[in-house]
Image (spheres, coloured by chain):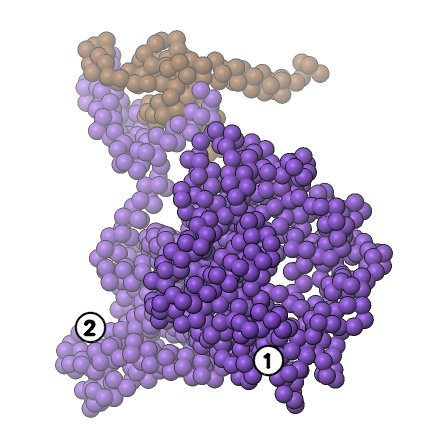
Chain colours: A purple, B brown
Amino acid sequence: MSSASAKMRAFLIRMVRSVCGWRGADEFDEELEAHVAMHTEAGVAAGLDEGEARRIALVKLGGAEQVRQARRERAGLVWLENLQQDLRYGARTLRRSPGFALTAVATVGLGIGACTAIFSLVNAVLIRSLPYGDPERLVYLFTPNPNLKIPEEVLCPGYGDYFDIRRENRSFESMSNLVQTRFSVDEQGIVQRIGSARVDEDFFHTLQAQPELGRPIAADDVQAGHERVAVISHALWVSMFGGRADVLQKSLTLDHALYRIVGVMPAEFEYPFGSDLPYGDSQIKSTQIWVPLLLTAAQRAEREPDNNVTIARLRAGVTVRAAQAEMAGIMARLDKQYPDDPNNEVASMRPYWGALVKTFTDMSVGPVRPLMRLLVAAVVLVLLIACGNAANLLLARAAERARELGVRTALGAGRGRMVRQLLTESLLIGAVGCAVGIALAYLFLRLLPRLDPGNIPRLNEASLDGRVLLVAVGAALFTSLFAGLLPAWRASRLELTEFLKAHGARAGSSGHSPVQSGLIVAQTAMVVLLLAAAGLLIRSYVKVVNVDTGFSESTVTFNVGLDERYSKPEQQVAFFQQLTARLNSLPGVLAAGAVNYLPLSNSESITLMYVDGYPNNKDFQQAEARYVTPKYFDAMGIPLLAGRYLSEDDYRRKSGVAVINKRFADLYFPDRNPIGAHISTDREADGWKDFNTVVGVVGNVRHMSLEEEAQPQMYYGNYQMNGAYVAVRATLPPAAIANEIRAMLKAIDPQLAMTDIRTMGDWISLASARRRFQTSLLTAFAGIALVLALVGLYGLMAFSVNRRTREVGIRMALGAERRDVLLLVMRNAGVLVGVGLVAGLACVWVVTRVMRSFLFGVSEHDPMTVVAVSALMIVCGLMAALVPARRAASIEPMQALRTD
Amino acid sequence: MGDKTDVWQGTLALMILKTLETMGPQHGYGLARRIEQTSGDLLQLNYGTLYPALLKLEQEGYVRSQWGVSDNNRKAKFYELTKAGQKQVRRATADWEQTTEILSRFLTPAEEA
């Protein structure tokens, strides 16, 4: 045994002995007795008389009591025993005043709970590293075009440009393309659409992700004739193949084609997640299947951006900025080298394809970073309020215990020991509060899946890991020290003589100290700030959900995707004609129609267009365009404002007609009738052709988000779609109609899946989920803060009434009415709340500016919110003060004067 | 004396271990007497200081104790070396010899010069 481990062993033994309280004292007494007896015997044998021999033995021993003491100190750990003693004493005093202890623990627990819960979220979303090798070096490559009024992060380089960038760059270690897709998979008789991705041979290598079984997609796989292989996710492996090892000998039918399974990814790898790609396929929550991305020679030469997503890994030491500069240079050269193809609508933007390199984490986490900051700010305020409360409680208690402390000082208790005692008490409260807080955070995490707005990355991975627990303990320690040091310091300054003269320090006229008042004012100000923030979010939320979307919320929608068996246009037309016709003849169905881009489903098609007869036609004039079947408007409840809807006749005759929305009409036909006007979306060389005649104007529909005004929209009649959303307005309840539709679809084609069955109300709910999430969280925190502050105010008022019993008695004896006494206390509370309110509103004025991006339809200085918050604060504050005030008013003067 | 305590405690531990090694199992009183005798009565030993030192060695696993009967039929607690204790004697002895050897070079420089 090395001497270090021997020391460790000794330390552990001493610790265990201290904790268990067993030190073998009796046994040692016996040993000592034997020692003295033997020594005495030896003395007697040497001729001394017994008394003298025993005296010498004891002297030689160095005193029995001293030896016992020395041995006791060695047996255990003295500091640990002192601590235990303090803790026992603290626990006993806390048990003796359960009201105080419960309030303090609940206060601290709520503060720490809120902090821990939110930190577990932030930890999962922002801090914990991604399951890809060295995610800091992963970037996305985009080619923004200033002429397209779409976000910069929608289009990635066309394949032709991609291969040029890949060949010429020196910034990237590797690059890869993926294309999101969905496959119909038959899982135990139920056809499901499963999120998938077509990926090139560099995909897994770029992400530095290895299969847990088998191999990744390799270069041989992306050759024609070899592409029927698939890598599947861990989850799919378990659900479809029972996690068996022979999966690599199995195949999987995807959209009726057989794919050989070559690999299984580890559980955490399901890239891309829905939240990874802000403009990705909104129906894909996570990716379960990866198949080779096969490109034809023509595709490889294509300069027009496709629906690919380009990811790359930066070489070590290359910054995002340098990579972007290099890519911009390459793009500028390509822009020159491949000039405008006049026949191609999108390529006509050629001179403007730019370069944008964005980090992986910025893309997935960037959009939620402000929300995380807001939540952290909110919980820090809650924690501070909890700290203030705990400090005030301890201060009040210290004042009440001034007598006890004074007596103990008088009896010779050292200041250090007193401070330690008081701090131990607050640490005890902190420790129990910490446990309560962690329990609350655990409950919050259990609740979280129900709050999940679905677009916060890795929200469902939030858990109480070591880092989160460390934060909880840190918060508890901070609270304990903050709350405990102030009273401890004041108690330690207690002047003995003063105490003896006055039976404990009597505070100023209000019955409590300025420190206590200051804490209440600060708390009130923070609560006002939180309430205002929550109020603004609530007002925004109400405005968002009540926004006029332009469609009916009760309409039931579902998605149906056609597979390879429907590759011919006439097959697609026939399918959707049959589907809509049969739907429209279902009993209880009022109208049914299909559309290729459903509002709020996070998909969009933008077209360039030219309005005949409009004097200000510009080069890059855009409108949202979609295909609909005749009864779509009726099914969605989109009102007709002028002209007529599309008719079956229009489809049959292919008459080239279109319906536009009100915004389109307002913008391009400000002073003439749009009906009969001509619009082209087909640009050829220098002219526009294939003009469509406007036959109707319909209401605006919010499409991309609830919070954005409708853009100019055009609708063409068309049955030819390889997949579509179908909208159904019915008199039956949604569940019943969904069942009928499912049965009907099965009758038409049992191999097609009906997915995404939702009412438009559900789509609204999904679109406002993030807002609901942030609003409910912030409101909950504001509520907690309000309750905490009121508890604090109530506690302080009760405390000062208690201390002023005698004074109130004298006032009443001198003729003060009960009403006067009541008002006295209420005025006192009113001043505190008033000052806090004013301070809080001043903060609101300055601070809510940072909230601007969270607001919708309200100004950050929204007067209604300010008024509501002020009223709420004053009413609640006065209510909290009313109970102690009434107690003061009910004091019996005679009794009060007799109390000491 | 204050800053010499450590050395003293260290040496006391070694004296105890060495004595146990040569004498075999021994009770506290016997150990104290023996150490005093071995030192040629040069050492003023407070017998009581032995007990915390013995407890420390026991906690460190170098000695173990059990009740037994002394020569004159008295019940007493006997201490004996453990395996780890035997190793520790050798190690501490070597350390101590090295220390004294180094020190002696400092204390008797005149002859060397």
Above or below, A557 against A619 in this view is: above
Q: Name the residue under label 2.
A: A900
Q: Do the residues labelled 2 and 1 touch (CB within 8 Å)?
A: no
Q: Nearer the viewer, residue A210 or A13?
A: A210
Would residue A444 appear left or right of A857 to someone viewing this image? left
Mark closer to the chain start, 2 or 1: 1
Q: Position of residue A488 (x, y in %)?
A: 37, 60
Residue at 40% of width from left, 67% of height from top? Answer: A585
Above or below, A433 relative to A630: above
Q: Which mark is residue A695?
A: 1
From this viewpoint, is residue A105 visible?
yes
Q: State the separation of the CA atoms marked 2 and 1.
A: 92 Å
**Which three-letter amino acid code belongs to the residue tagged 1?**
Val
The answer to which image quadrant residue A688 occupies is: bottom right
Secondary structure under the numbered disc 2 in the rendered image: loop
| Image quarter in which the C terminus of chain A is found | bottom left
Q: Is residue A176 above or below residue A560?
A: above
